[in-house]
Structures are given as C-alpha cells and as structure tokens.
Amino acid sequence: MFILVNLKAYDCDPVAIATAAAAVGDDADVRVAVAPQTADIARVAETGVETWAQHVDPVGHGSHTGSTLADSVVTAGAQGTLLNHSERRLRLADIDAGIRATERAGLDTIVCANDPKQIGAVTALSPDMVAVEPPELIGTGTPVSHADPEVVREAVSAADAVDSSIPVLCGAGISSGEDVTAAGELGSEGVLLASGVAKADDPRAALADLVTGL
Amino acid sequence: MFILVNLKAYDCDPVAIATAAAAVGDDADVRVAVAPQTADIARVAETGVETWAQHVDPVGHGSHTGSTLADSVVTAGAQGTLLNHSERRLRLADIDAGIRATERAGLDTIVCANDPKQIGAVTALSPDMVAVEPPELIGTGTPVSHADPEVVREAVSAADAVDSSIPVLCGAGISSGEDVTAAGELGSEGVLLASGVAKADDPRAALADLVTGL
Amino acid sequence: MFILVNLKAYDCDPVAIATAAAAVGDDADVRVAVAPQTADIARVAETGVETWAQHVDPVGHGSHTGSTLADSVVTAGAQGTLLNHSERRLRLADIDAGIRATERAGLDTIVCANDPKQIGAVTALSPDMVAVEPPELIGTGTPVSHADPEVVREAVSAADAVDSSIPVLCGAGISSGEDVTAAGELGSEGVLLASGVAKADDPRAALADLVTGL
Amino acid sequence: MFILVNLKAYDCDPVAIATAAAAVGDDADVRVAVAPQTADIARVAETGVETWAQHVDPVGHGSHTGSTLADSVVTAGAQGTLLNHSERRLRLADIDAGIRATERAGLDTIVCANDPKQIGAVTALSPDMVAVEPPELIGTGTPVSHADPEVVREAVSAADAVDSSIPVLCGAGISSGEDVTAAGELGSEGVLLASGVAKADDPRAALADLVTGL
C-alpha cells in the first residue's frame, strides 16, 4: 500500500509531519509520501520523505506567470504530483497536457476523479496512478472504504477495463489503519488522506496507526 | 453519415442556413443538423432542421444565473448538444455532469476531444457520440481526413477499445464532399464543420457539395 | 425604481412571468424587466416586457463555440444583460471586454459585485449600471436593505466616488414592496430579485406587491 | 524606481539571477526584486534579494489542495506577490479576496491590469501597487514607454482619480535603462520586466544596464 498525506493549505507544520512520515514509513517498511504546499516542497524533501506536489500546471518552460512548472517542483525535490484533485478540478485537455508535462519532467502522477466513470476516463489518459475520491466524503472522517465500498470496487473495475496496469488508489474520510486495510481489501493499492494526519494532535501517532495492519 | 454544421458566433444568417440544411438533407436523405447560438435555437428549430446547442452547463434547475440549462434548449427545440468543444473546453467533472444533465433533459450529446487519448477518456463517460477535432486544424480549410488521417483512425480505435457502441465523428478543416467521404472511409460516422458552410458565399451550394458522395 | 426579475435556471414559466411583469409594470408605471434563460429570450421578448440576458460572453463574431454573443441576444429581443453575477463571476479583463462587446451590440449592462469595494472597481469600467448583491443574502428571503443597509449606502458612495453618473442597484433577499421602498431610501435606483417572483405561487401578485410603494 | 524581475516559467537559473539582482540593486541603491517559481522562492530568498511570488490564491488555511497559500510564500521568504498578471487573469471577486488574503499574511501586492480603465478598477480594491501591462507588448522587446506612452500616462491618471496614494508601475517590452528612465518620466514608480533579464545571455549585465539612469 502507498500512503499519500496531502497537507492541502492546512495550518500545520509540514517539516514535522514529513519527518514523522519518513520515520513511520521506514519503521513499517511502507511507502509513505507527503504533499505539502509548493513553497514548502524543498524543506519537506530535505527530511528524506518521498515528496509530492499537490498540482502542477499543463505547461512547459515559457511565459506562464503564476503557473507551477513540473520542472520546478522536480528541482525542489518532488517525485510526483496530484492532478485534478476535487479541490482543483481541471479541464480534460489540461489533465492530458499535465500528464505529458510531468512525463517530460520525470514526475509521477496520480490523477484524481470523483467516481468510477471518471476513473475510467482518466485511466485512458495513461497517468501513473489514479485515485477515486467521492467529494461528498472528503474531510468527513467517514471512510470511503466503509461508507461506499462499491465505489472503490467499481473504480478498480473501471480502471481495469481500460488499462489494468494502472494502480487505483482511494481517498476521502480515511484516518485509521482499519480504513487502510479495508481499502486494500477492496482492490485499492494505496490511499490519499489529509486531515486525519494534518489536523491530528499527534501526527506521528496518527501515521503509526495508519500502517498497523500492513 | 451525420453532418453537423456549427455556426459558432459567426456573422451569418442562421435561419437561411437552417432552411438550406433541411432542404439539402431531405433531398439527399442525409442527416444534417445545425447548431446555432443559444438565442437562435427556437427560430432555427422552426425551419424543421435538426437543431443542436453548442454547449449546455452541467446543472439542473436552480440558482445558476448565466448558465444554459439543458431543459431550456430542449424547450426551444434542440435535439442535442455539443460538449467540450475545443473553443469551450470543460473540466472533466463538468463533462460528466453535463452528460448526466442532458440525459435527464432528453438531449443527445456529442463530446468533443483533441486527440485519440482524450477520445478514449470521453468515451468512458458514455455520451451518445464523440468527435475528434485536432485544434490546430480547426478553421484552416485543411481537412483532418487528409492532413492527419491517422488521428481519425486512432480515435476510432481508442473509442472502440473503451465502448464500441459509441459512434465517432471527426472535424476540423472539412469543407467538401470529398472530405466527408474520406472521413467515412477512416471509420468516422459523421463530421462536424463550421466555416466551410457558415462563411460560404452560398451556404446551400456548400451543403449540397458536402453530401454529393453519400 | 427599476425592477429586474432574474429567472436564473428556475423551473418556472418564463412567458407567464413576463406577461405578468409587463402588465404590472404598465399598470403601476414602473420599469420592470425580466431576464430569462438565453434560449427563452425571444419568446419572453414577444410578450412586450423589457427583456434582459443573464450573461453574454466578452467576444465579437468569430470562432467562439458555446459562447453567448451580445448580438445574438439583441436579435432575439434583449435590451440589456447582467454581467458578473455572483453565480457567474468573471475575470476582471472579461468584465471589461464584455462591457465593450455590449456597447458595440447596443446592449445595456448591469455589472454585479459583492460589496462596496468591488462596486467601486466595476464602476471604473463604465457600465450602464452597477448592482451590489452580498452573496450570503442571495436567495435567503432576508432583504439586503434590512439585513445590511450599510452595504447599500456604502456601495452608492463607492460608485459615486468613481463616477456619480452610474446608477446603483441592489439585490439579495428582496421580495416585497417594503424591501423595494427601503432600497430606494438607501440610494438604490433599482433592485434585482429572483426567487421572490420566480418561485412565488402567484408571480403576478408577487410583482404587484413589489411596486405598491412606488 | 522599483524594478521587479518576473522569471515566469522560463528556463533560467533563478539563484544566479537573484544573486546578480541583489548585487546590482545594492551597488546602485535601487530597489530590485525577483519573482521566481513558487517552488524556488526559498532558495531565491536565501540570496538576500527581495523576493516576490508570481501569484497566490484567494484563500486562507483550509481544504484547498493545489492552491498557493499566501502564508506559505511568506514562510518561504516572499515579501510580496503579483496578482492578476495577464498570463494569470483572475476573476474580480478573487482579486479582491486575494488582496485580503495577502493583507492577513503580511504580503505586499502588485495588481496587474491591461489598460487604464482596468487600472482604475483594481486601484479601487486598495492593493499596495498597481501595474499596467498592455498584453500585446509583453515579450516583444518593444517597450510600453516607447510604443504606447499614453497608456502609461492614462493609467497613472486613472489610478490617481480613484486613489492617489497607490503607486503605478508599468511593464511590457522593457529591457534597457533608457526604457526604465522613460517609464519614470511618464509617472511610473517602477517597472515589471521578464525576458529582458531572464533570457539575457548575461543577466547581471542586463540588470546593470537597467539601473544606469537611476
């Protein structure tokens, strides 16, 4: 299982969470990554944790003021990026162009989508991974793996029908090791989570709990 | 073959073109439709031609000032709508929601996309038809069926791989009956065109030429 | 006072409301206009009521599939258009370009904004009128003139400081003649309203109530 | 005069340019700042040069995946941010909310606009500075101060008419000390430039030339 902790724009200490994530991942031999604000990527990457961007723009070098260039996050230490998160939905053509931009820059991608149909669609664009996150469950604390297990199973089927080589992750409401295990049993090869760690009183304990069943 | 004439925001006479399209389609027993400005749908539909919208918004009834509601174009006489034209690219989630909104309203959909990969993606969303239009050829007068026949063949393959029941159309640069015939030989079940008719000195003659080979 | 009834994408009978609005306006000698869906402009205008669009795009004739062209709504019978409604917020450059497009097409504009600072900003773009609508009050039934009279007074001051020739309207939560009168006492030269008429059991009675104090 | 070097998404060495900018600014006693990619802010700020962001999003802490939070660029070392650059045009309501977000975070703002009317509009939103940049001259090498001096004079007048306390900068095509001096003579209190430095064979020499007349 791959655990990606999305720090969004939360009021948290990205370096402390990154340090904890690196330690917990090493101890449990689980792949754990952290996606901080773009401006924090360099100092998060310095902790040694696998570091992801939350978004990059579908552009290459050029006159693109205010865009986040894939190459710039690679230079800062990122290994991958989310694209099309439900809080940053993109036009279809820009998801496609974004995947091409990340390929040129050597950045992995997880393309998010709301439901199985959209998972089928984004799988057709050949990203590295896809992630299903029902928007109505994001931030609720009610895990998708419990509230709507069918959406995970169907997302896995929808992706498999288009390209079975692309791993499917899931997210929304995940905060415990039990949720992670349940996600895996539904066919998910990883989870995205955010507030469960970023807003936890003790992020390290929250991370340790996540990997207990793995 | 299905021929859809997109009037965009061109300075043309939509009723005259619609009247010509209805006559030419009837004479040749070819399905010909016209997609005018939203405000012109009612008077275009009154000519008896099959009428399409150029875009509807992914919403139902409610507080959506400035949106084009699928039900409102149905009431005005539209039978279908384009979605995600390269001049009106949509977010993936909105293409999906737009298809659902048109289903509820009883409106057919053609979802446009730039290339075969994106055609695979939009096919996964189960629209009624899909259309591949390389943006760089739109409005050039160089037909996609001649300039880039592989993009049409590959778009047909990409759609078939996802859902072989969904017809693939093509567009960009098409203006003659030869272009339409060539498109059909590449596996396309219809064409989108615009300036070739809307900007023609004699739209009826342009339309008559389009159907000569059918 | 100018009363503009915005039908949004509500499930209502635009022709019945337009007919009632024309009759009530004539009886009371009050300027009353109706802004229906774009596809309904022609049949609303045929009732004789002053007809407005809810939005037009900042473009002229050309390759703009899915845009609403100012000229097309003029041809259908519209006299003016809203721009930048809080449900259809525009980029600053597009508000400016939209005002220029409407000027060329001979269409009046009301540019909406959320608060007095933004009213000052849009007044600087020289539209025909501006309208302040606090988004948090829209659709509540709590009239801005009662809930937040200062926002109306300050919007009038902000507009006057930039260009005192441009009338200021207000909207949000307005549903009664008392609300309209109160708006006028705060310096507003008109009101925008929507659900108070469009969702009323008896739209004509709702309209008649609106003009009682004028 | 304030000289802001916008590195856009150019393929350049941000640290080398920042080091040169700091040295040239110190030598000439001129305020020179550099606006790199968000991911590069921290290492640019470490050179000691005044560092700006190219854009921040109109949000505070919270669930805003993929947004650039004003606080995060402050933490990384930024002192200010551009908003509404012509390559990243924003909705009016978001310019306003962006200015409020930067105020809370302690970040200065330069709000860009295309022409004098829009300069009047953004001045009404009370940013720290405004900058007029005719989009058609950006990247041309033809300086706005030479090609269209009236647009600079009129922008200064438009801003003054709304709030004379807000400095007006200009940009587009500026690459020499002569251009900077000319801009100052037109009433501009600073310049934005980009390719003239970022794409120069010798950025330090280009910077040194810019300050020669000051």
Image (cartoon, coloured by chain):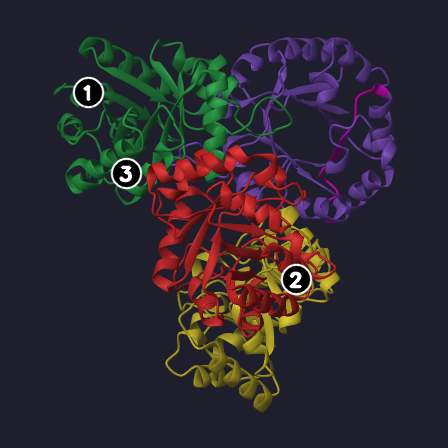
Chain colours: A yellow, B purple, C green, D red
Do callouts 1 and 3 mark residues in contact (Cβ within 8 Å)? no
Q: Which mark is residue C205?
A: 1
Do callouts 3 and 2 mark residues in contact (Cβ within 8 Å)? no
Q: Quadrant of residue B194?
A: top right
Q: Nearer the viewer, mark 2 or mark 1?
A: 2
Region in magenta: B162-177
Chain identity of mark 3: C
Give the percent coordinates (x, y) of residue B1: 77, 25
Is B56 located above or below residue C3 in the figure? Answer: below
Chain identity of mark 1: C
Give the percent coordinates (x, y) of residue A108: 68, 67
Nearer to me, D169 or C144: D169
Which amino acid is tagged 3?
Gly
Q: Is residue B201 left or right of residue A182?
A: right
Which amino acid is tagged 1?
Ala
Q: CA distance from mark 1 to mark 3?
A: 19 Å
Which amino acid is tagged 2?
Ala
Nearer to me, B61 or D127: D127
Q: CA distance from mark 2 to mark 1?
A: 59 Å
Give the position of the N terminus of chain A as an image quadrant. Answer: bottom right
Element at label 2: helix
Q: Main secondary structure of the magenta part?
A: loop
Q: Is residue C183 left or right of residue B29?
A: left
Q: Which residue is mark 2?
A: A70
Element at label 1: helix
| Same subunit, tags 2 and 1 | no
Chain identity of mark 2: A
Mark 1 residue crowding within 10 angstroms, few (<14) / some (14–19) / many (20+): few
